């Protein structure tokens, strides 16, 4: 798991926070309070990473101060603090598959849920966790 330096920008007297990642151009987020900003920063980082094949290695804060061209501007004009945000990959994307099942089984599933796919997915996961082979 990679941890990226995040700059949390805020205005005095405001609850809102902006978040940018100096290592990842174009990756930014915001939140209505600190906890929300952290949650949104994780989401922004995961979404950014999902579209990239080769993410840069995270730099240390010292490296960012030396190498990031916007550091001095940020340091002078913004009220911010530095944090690390861990990259948690997104859940795998769902794909559509056609399967064949006994109609009476589908009817029984429909009586207990409105979402067949989610129901079948959970059932399969549980079955695989038990190590049962059919």
Image (cartoon, rainbow, N blue to C red):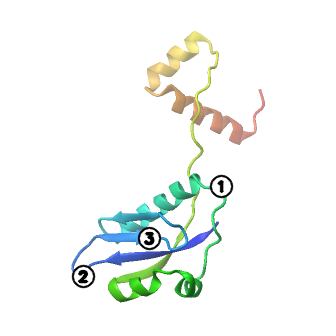
Q: Nearer the viewer, mark 1 or mark 2?
A: 1
User: Which label is found at residue 53?
Assistant: 1
How far separated are the C-alphas under marks 1 and 3? 20 Å
Give residue 1's quadrant in the image.
bottom right
Give residue 38's quadrant in the image.
bottom left
Between 89 and 131, the one nearer to me in the picture: 89
| Residue 73 locus on image (x, y percent) | 40, 84
Which quarter of the rendered picture does the C terminus lie within? Answer: top right
| Residue 25 locus on image (x, y percent) | 50, 66
Between 14 and 66, the one nearer to me in the picture: 66
Q: Earlier in the sequence, mark 1 or mark 2?
A: 2
Between 28 and 98, the one nearer to me in the picture: 28
Q: Earlier in the sequence, mark 2 or mark 3?
A: 2
How far separated are the C-alphas under marks 1 and 2? 38 Å
Residue reaching furthest front?
69
Between 59 and 70, the one nearer to me in the picture: 70
| Residue 129 locus on image (x, y percent) | 69, 42
User: Which label is found at residue 12?
Assistant: 2
Taking the spot 75% from the left edge, 39% from the top edge, the residue there is 131
Residues at circles 1 and 2 in contact by the CB criterion of under 8 Å: no
Taking the spot 64% from the left edge, 15% from the top edge, the residue there is 100
**Disc 1 residue crowd, few under 14, some 14–19, many 20+, Cα 10 Å:** few
Q: Is residue 56 above or below residue 62?
A: above
Residue reaching furthest top?
103
Q: Which residue is denoted by mark 3 in the rendering?
A: 20
Residues at circles 2 and 3 in contact by the CB criterion of under 8 Å: no
How far separated are the C-alphas under marks 2 and 3? 18 Å
Direction from residue 10 to residue 117 in the image, left or right: right
**Disc 2 residue crowd, few under 14, some 14–19, many 20+, Cα 10 Å:** few
Residue reaching furthest left?
13
Label 3 element class: strand
How many marks the image carries: the answer is 3
């Amino acid at each position: 798991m990679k941890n990226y330096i995040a700059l949390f920008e805020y205005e005095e007297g405001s609850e809102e926070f902006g978040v940018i990642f100096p290592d990842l151009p174009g990756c930014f987020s915001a939140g209505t309070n600190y906890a929300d900003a952290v949650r949104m920063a994780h989401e922004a980082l995961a979404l950014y990473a999902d579209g990239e094949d080769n993410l840069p290695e995270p730099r240390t804060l010292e490296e960012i101060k030396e190498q990031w061209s916007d550091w001095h501007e940020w340091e002078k004009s913004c009220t911010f603090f530095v944090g690390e945000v861990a990259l948690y990959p997104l859940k795998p994307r769902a794909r559509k598959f056609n399967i064949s099942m006994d109609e009476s089984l589908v009817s029984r599933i429909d009586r207990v849920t409105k979402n067949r796919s989610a129901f079948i997915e959970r059932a399969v996961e549980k079955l695989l966790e038990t190590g049962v082979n059919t």
